[in-house]
Image (tube, helix red, strand yellow):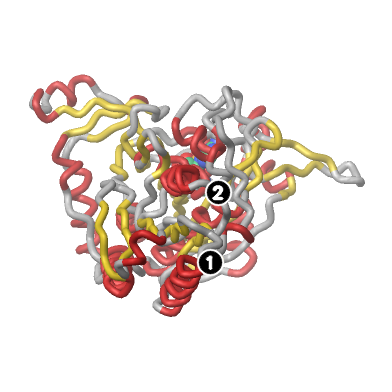
Amino acid sequence: MKLSQYFLPVLKEAPREAEIASHQLMLRAGMVRQQSAGIYSWLPLGLNVMRKVEQVVREEQNRAGAIEVLMPTIQSADLWRESGRYDDYGREMLRIQDRHERDMLFGPTNEEMITDIFRAYVKSYKNLPLNLYHIQWKFRDEVRPRFGVMRGREFLMKDAYSFDIDEASSRAAYYRMFVSYLRTFDRLGVKAVPMRADTGPIGGDLSHEFLILADTGESEVFCHADTMKLPVPDRTVDYGDDALIAGIVDDWTRAYARTDEMHDEALWSAVPEGDRVNARGIEVGHIFHFGTKYSQPMGATVTGPDGKETPVFMGSYGIGPSRVVAALIEAGHDDDGIIWPDSVAPFDVGLINLRVGDQATDAACAALYEQMANAGLDPLYDDTDNRAGGKFALADLIGLPWQLIVGPRGLANGEVEIKKRASGERETLSMEAAINRLVAWREQVKERFGG
Ligand code: P5A
C-alpha cells in the first residue's frame, strides 16, 4: 500500500476525552472514529488489525472443532421471553419495535437464538457434540461506555455455543474452548491469564475469564505467579483427546487465579506472599458452562442412546475482537506510539522514502516495494512529500514491526537502514540483505504465530 493512496487520517493531538493510552493512540493513528458514545466507525488501519485478530480467533475456533455460522444482529423479543431473560436483562438491552409494533432487540449475546436453531434441527445424540460460533456485532447499552472500543456499546464478539448429551461431554467441550483460548491469545502475541470468574447474566456453574494484565484494566485480579509461567500448547494439540485436554486445563487451573468477584481471602492467604500477583486486568475472553439453563425452558431436547429425551447441555464462549485490538495496544506501546505484535500488525514494514522526487531514491524505493510484495511481505510505502521527521514520527505512531529507511546518502554506498520498532535497534545493510532480513523474520513469525 502506498501512503499517498491510503486513508490514514492521523491526528496531531489526542482528543482530551481519551483517558487511556490505547484510546488516545487509536484516535491519533486514525484507526477509529467515535460516532456516538461507545459507537465507533473502524477506519482502514483499525479494521486491518481487527480483521487479523478475527482471523486468528476463527482459525483456532475451527481447529478446536467449532463451526462458523452467522446470526443476525436483530432478534425477536419472543425468543428472550422463552428463556425468561427478556425482563431480567434490564436497561443494557437495546429494545426496538418494528413497523408492526413487534418487540425486537439488538442482540447483546445469542444464547437464545442458537438454542432456537439447535432445537429446529437436532434431535439425536448422534449429531453431538456440536459447537457453533459466529463473529457478529453486539449492542449493550452500558451505563458507562468508556476507554474507546475497550468498553463500547456496539462491539464485535466471537461467540461460540456448545451442545452435548451430558454433563461430562459438556465439560469436555468447555475444556476444548479453554485450550483454544490459550492458543488464540498466544498467537495474538499476548499473555491472557485464565481466572475463575462470576457468571453474571449469562448464568451457569463454571466460568473463566481470560485477562491481559494492564494497569488500566477494569478488573482486579488475584493470581499465583505460577499461572503466569505455564507453557501454551502448540498447534499439534489433539482436541480429540479429552484426557489430554482436561490435563492441560488442570495444569492451568491448579494455582489460585480469580477475579475480584470470586476472590476468596482464606484461599488467597494460603498462597505464599512472594507468589501473590494482585494486579489489574482487561477481560478479553469469557467462557461459561451452564448446562440446561436455556435448553430446558426452550425445549431443546435430544434423544439419548437409551431412547430417553433430555435437555441438551450447553456452554458459551466469548472473545471481543474489537476490545482485543485496544488491549493489544495497552499491552504494547511506548511514548512514541503503538508497538503491534508481529502476528497482527497492520503492515509488516514501513518503507520510508526520505527524498521523494530524487530519482535514485524513488527508483530504489520502487524496487524495494516490488521485491517485498513479491516475497510475500506487506509494506506500507511512505511516498508522501512530508518531512523526514514527520515520516519517522508517523511510522513510530502506527507501530509497524519494521521500518526500512531509504535516503540518497545511504544509497550512494548502496545501503539502506532498517529499524526494529519494538527495540529501536537500527542497522545499515545492503538492499538485498535488508530484504533477506525481513523475509527471514516473516518466516519466523509464521512458524511461531501462524495457523
Ligand atoms: C459468551 C459468549 C458472553 O456474552 N455469551 C456469548 C457469553 N460473555 S461476555 O463476557 O459478556 O462477553 C464476551 C466478551 O465480549 C467482550 N465484551 C466487550 N467488548 C467491548 N465492549 C464491551 N462493552 C464488551 N462487553 C463484552 C469481552 O471480550 C468479553 O470477554
In this view of the protein, can residue 399 be seen by the observer? yes
Amino acid beneath label 2? Asn
Q: Quadrant of residue 123?
A: bottom right
Q: Nearer the viewer, residue 148 or 113?
A: 148
For the point 58% across and 44% down, the residue is 30
x 47%, y 50%: residue: 316
**Closer to the N terminus: mark 2 or mark 1?**
1
Q: CA distance from mark 2 to mark 1?
A: 45 Å
Q: Name, please, the residue furthest toward the bottom.
A: 374
Within-10-Å neighbours for mark 2: few <14, some 14–19, many 20+: few
Whether residue 403 sits left or right of residue 39 in the image: it is: left
Q: Quadrant of residue 148?
A: top right
The quarter of the image holding the C terminus is: bottom left
Q: Mark 2 or 1, which is nearer the eye? A: 2
Q: Residue at x 46, y 36 (%)?
A: 22
Q: Check contact, mark 2 vs mark 1: CB within 8 A.
A: no
Q: Which residue is mark 1?
A: 68
x%, y% of residue 270?
Answer: 11, 25
- Measured as percent of width and height from the top left, residue 273 is found at 10, 23
Q: Which residue is mark 2?
A: 386
Q: Quadrant of the N terminus?
A: bottom right
- Residue at 34% from the left image edge and 66% from the top image edge: 412
**SS of the residue at dot 1?**
strand
Percent position of residue 213, x then y: 31, 35
Q: Secondary structure at mark 2?
A: loop
Relative depth, front residue between 54 and 27: 27
Does 397 sit above or below residue 171? above
Count every numbered label the image shows and give the total.
2
Q: Residues within 10 Å of mark 1 (few under 14, many from 20)?
A: some
Amino acid type of the residue that numbered disc 1 sits on in the rendered structure:
Glu
331 relative position to 290: left or right: left
